[in-house]
Amino acid sequence: MERMCGTVVRGVRAPIIRSGDDLVAIVTDSVLSASECENFAIQNRDIIAVTEAVVARAQGNYATVDNIATDVRAKLGGEDIGVIFPILSRNRFAICLRGIAKGAKKIYLMLSYPSDEVGNHLISLDQLDATDVNPYTDVLSLKEYRELFGYNKHPFTGVDYVEYYGDLIKECGAEVEIIFGNDCRSILKYTKNVLNCDIHTRARTKRILLANGAEKVCSLDDILNAPVDGSGCNVNYGLLGSNKATEETVKLFPEKCQEFVEAVQQRVLEKTGKLVEVMVYGDGAFKDPVGKIWELADPVVSPGYTNGLEGTPNEIKLKYLADNDFAALSGQELKDAISEYIKNKNSNLVGNMASQGTTPRRLTDLIGSLCDLTSGSGDKGTPIVFIQGYFDNYTSQKA
């Protein structure tokens, strides 16, 4: 029988997860309970996605500001530190900054402008255009910045992050000098010890700093990449991907995600006889055109996924076929021709004009974005997302 629905996405409710919980069992049981309650059957190649937040919480992967301070002090000397290119976020960076400030005597805080790496704007492009400032070359002092641009509050949070970060550093006992620049080498006029806080450009920034005379350089993935005084850690990402837990603690990005997704896949197979795909997801990779915020503040969209989610889509653009190859056909004849084309498509459509305009992104990035938008970050209570029909196409029939 012909299938009339394509991809179906369900947010699945689960108990509130605590440290030490058996998350493999909880995820499996929650999906099975949802299938009974909502009357859907689990099929091969369905996808179970679990937000990174509950994975890290179940693992107890937390650290305190004092743990951060100890590691920063040990790796950067505990004196003057340049802290460059942080994102503007109370949730993502403010608690980390508390620890960093506690691990130094003076912070030279260099903020990128007009926006941070993920699109949070200190000032608008229109404000910048009204000046003679060249953001590629000009370094501004706090006094110059205020004279040019005044006080600007984030449109969503109502926070002036320049003032907020400066006050936070002083509250933690460190001196602070705030500057504005986009060339990482500019910080070396102030200090040779640098913590670069950019996410996706961190390797390049570190390379440039070391090539231009920096003495000690760490990225956020170098801080808490091993336990400190019994803390949690993330071997690959350190503080990257962390979130505020309390005013004194952060929840780190989860560890051992590959073991987790494979364990869930195996448990579902044992319970149902179906081989599903499983992934852990964090931020989606999409941009808000109004707020101009690029969502991806995590180092990766998915830190762990089963083998069936490797790769990119291999899809045909239906409207291209309808407008070109089969422009003279209509009705059932058109449907049959397109269906036959899909059934016989090549396993690799790279460079094929019929695939032009399909989304050339990794499956995990696409699915992770879908999950992030589905589960949200508030009180929906659905840290598990169950997806059916994602790998179907126009020719798929009912099971």
Image (cartoon, rainbow, N blue to C red):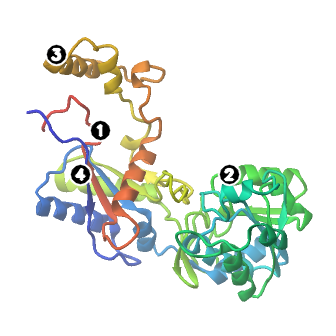
Badge 4 density bin: few <14, some 14–19, many ≥20, Cα 10 Å:
some
Per the model, the C-alpha gap separating discs 3 and 2 is 51 Å
Vertical placement of residue 388 versus 144, above or below: above
Contact, mark 1 vs mark 4 (Cβ under 8 Å): no
Vertical placement of residue 209 versus 62, above or below: above
Badge 3 density bin: few <14, some 14–19, many ≥20, Cα 10 Å:
few
Q: Is residue 321 visible?
A: yes
Image quadrant occupied by the N terminus: top left
Q: Of the residues shown, which amino acid type is indicated by label 2?
A: Thr
In the displayed image of the protein, which residue is found farthest to the front? 130
Image disc number at residue 201: 2
- Residue at numbered disc 1: 391
Per the model, the C-alpha gap separating discs 3 and 4 is 40 Å
Q: Residue at x 84, y 60 (%)?
A: 139
Contact, mark 3 vs mark 4 (Cβ under 8 Å): no
- In the image, which is nearer the foreground, mark 3 or mark 2? 3
Front-most of residues 77 and 328: 328
Q: Of the residues shown, which amino acid type is indicated by label 3?
A: Glu
- Residue at numbered disc 3: 333
Q: Is residue 215 visible?
A: no
Image disc number at residue 289: none
In the displayed image of the protein, which residue is found farthest to the left? 1
